[in-house]
Amino acid sequence: MISTIEKPPSQVWKNAKRYKARFFESKYPLCGTYVVYAVVGRKWVRISQGDLVLPDKSGRHQLPRFRMSVREWDKLPVRYEYDDRDMAVVASDSRNN
């Protein structure tokens, strides 16, 4: 059985959206391209990779969370909203399967 990544359950992440973003600043705990949850505010963007949840829902582990300024968020070289359902459709329609 495989663990899954879910949106953090706290109220802070209620309005979080999924983004695919590329991080290359050494001051952040992530480096490279990741699918993350982000809450974009007026001055700050809260970012989380999500929570790793065991298959039987008995345990939950927080993956890296941090914040960055909206100005830095807007300067990221790659940043777009990510929808898992769109990717599932692409995978099912792929001629490589």
Image: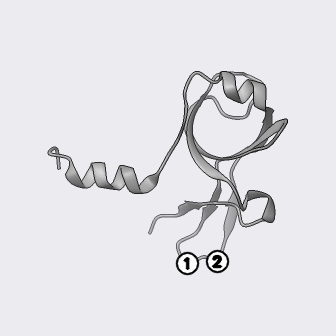
Residue at figure coordinates x 70%, y 21% from the top left: 25
For residue 26, above or below residue 13: above
Disc 1 designates what residue?
Answer: 56
In this picture the colour scheme is: one colour
**CA separation in Å, label 2 and label 1:** 5 Å
Give the camera-side residue of 9 and 5: 9
Residue with the most extreme right position: 43
State the SS at label 2. Answer: loop
Of residue 55 and residue 9, the one placed in the foreground of this image is: 9
Circle 1 packing at 10 Å, graded few (<14), some (14-19), many (20+), is few
Q: Amino acid at mark 1?
A: Asp
Instruction: Tell me the residue that label 2 is attached to.
Output: 58
Residue 64 appears at what percent x and percent y?
72, 45
Taking the image as shown, residue 20 lies to the left or right of residue 70, namely left
Q: Quadrant of residue 62?
A: bottom right
Q: Residue at left 74%, top 25%? A: 72
Q: Residue at x 38, y 51 (%)?
A: 86
Residues tagged 2 and 1 counted as in contact (Cβ below 8 A):
yes
